Image: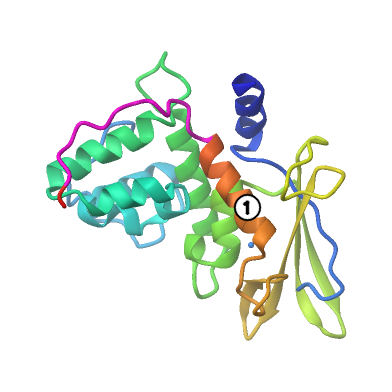
Amino acid sequence: MRSNRRTWIRKSLTFRTALSFAVASVVAAAMPAAGATAGFNEFPTIGAEAMAYYEGDIDQWMDGPVEYLALKSEREVWKKLGTSADRVAFIRWFWDRRDDDSTTTKNPFKIAFYERVAAANDRFAQFPRGWRSDRGRVWVTLGRPDSMRGIFNGGGSGERWSYFTNGREHAFTNAYGEVQLGFALLRGEYRIVGGFGGAGVYPLYVRHAFDYTRRAAIVDPTLELNVKLSD
């Protein structure tokens, strides 16, 4: 069961999707030392540079793109860490429990994650840029879409992103195992659409898909974190 789920997730490091809208309406394996961010811009477009940059600021690490990947329970533990040394230990533990290849000192999942972050930074130049944008968040969390289409009509323009789950049906998919995502171009910014509250509000099924993907990434849920937590 776990093997089948991991094989499916690893195909795109997530699941797959599809959508239609009336109005288009989302290098190292070792930890760099603190301060390793010097010399890099804020939105690196190369995977190894993205890893060095976002892993370099130990104390602010959880405010980076890994916030899309972290479970709620992990964020709660992070808040209770009292020292930078404890945060370094946490970060290593965080990636180790997602490492599905123990035959190498490198972590393929971690490398692929930062490749997606770099790709988002490279592709999405509008404000908010890169991984911080709605499209960037989806790209980083779910991976590259199986299909991307521009949509243009009298009501505006946008994009349709499609992911496919190979026919597997989940709470966040339609009967064909598809999840449907779209973005509307509003005042120069692409915002996700379909949620209650208007553009920029993630639909519930998308949030469920995010949660599924985050949980499916955990290879070793029993791996212990040996640090002292503050009250």
Helix, strand or loop status at disc 1: helix
Residue occupying the point 67% across, 79% down: 198
Q: Give the vertical position of 61 relative to 8 (above or below).
A: below
Residue 147 drawn above or below residue 5: below
Name above or below for residue 124 compared with residue 147: below
Is residue 44 or residue 169 the one in the foreground? 169
Residue 228 in the image: state x and y as whole percent: 14, 40
Which residue: 69% across, 57% down? Answer: 205
In front here: 202 or 221? 221
| Stretch of the chain drawn in magenta | 217-229
| Left or right of 139 in this view: 56 | left
Label 1 neighbour load within 10 Å: few <14, some 14-19, many 20+: some
For the question of whether residue 72 can be seen, the reply is yes
Residue 53 visible in the snapshot: no
Q: As shown in the figure, which amino acid type bears the numbered disc 1?
A: His
Query: Residue 123, located in which quarter of the rendered image?
Result: bottom right
> Which image quadrant is residue 107 in?
top left
Q: How many marks?
A: 1
Residue 9, above or below 187: above
In the displayed structure, does residue 184 sit left or right of residue 91?
right
Please name the predominant secondary structure of the magenta segment in the image: loop
- For disc 1, the marked residue is 208
Where is residue 140? Give x, y as percent. 54, 51
Does the stretch in magenta take in 219? yes
Magenta stretch containing residue 29, yes or no? no
Q: Residue at x 17, y 36 (%)?
A: 227
What x and y, as percent, mark residue 35? 17, 52
Q: Quadrant of the N terminus?
A: top right
Instruction: Tell whether 99 sits left or right of 57.
Output: right
Q: Is residue 7 left or right of residue 109?
A: right
